[in-house]
Amino acid sequence: MGRSIVNFVPGFEGSYLGDASRLPASARLECKICWWVYDPAQGDPVWQIDPGTAFSALPAHWRCPQCDGAAEQFMVLRDAA
């Protein structure tokens, strides 16, 4: 018997579906592995990312400074209004 193959995307993509261009510049994102939050207002001193740098402007090689998770593993935080 033949097997049908379902489209499979390996790994997990955050709630922005891996397309950082869809994010507003002020979006805060949380690592789904360790819960570290990237806040553009603070940047990332570990990776020497200046405050004011949007998540979409992070270099392609950037990873979570706490657990080394890929940027695609981050989920958008919905701030309380």
Image: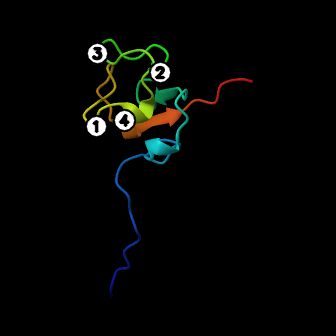
Crowdedness near tag 2: few (<14), some (14–19) or many (≥20) residues, C-alpha within 10 Å: many
Q: What is the C-alpha distance between the residues marked 2 and 4?
A: 14 Å
- The label shown at residue 48 is 3
Task: Say which quadrant the C terminus sits in.
Answer: top right
Q: Label 2's element?
A: loop
Foreground: disc 4 or disc 1? 1
What is the C-alpha distance between the residues marked 4 and 1?
A: 8 Å
Dot 3 or dot 2: first in sequence order is 2
Label 3 residue SS: loop
Q: Which residue is mark 1?
A: 60
Figure check: 8 above or below 24:
below
Q: Is residue 43 above or below residue 60?
A: above
User: Which residue position holds label 4?
Assistant: 71
Disc 2 from disc 1: Cα separation: 16 Å
Q: Where, by quadrant of the figure, is residue 49 drawn? A: top left
- Mark drawn on residue 40: 2
**Residue 3 image position (x, y, % from top left):** 34, 80
- In the rendered structure, which disc, 2 or 4, sits on the residue that comes first in sequence? 2
x, y (%) of residue 56?
42, 36
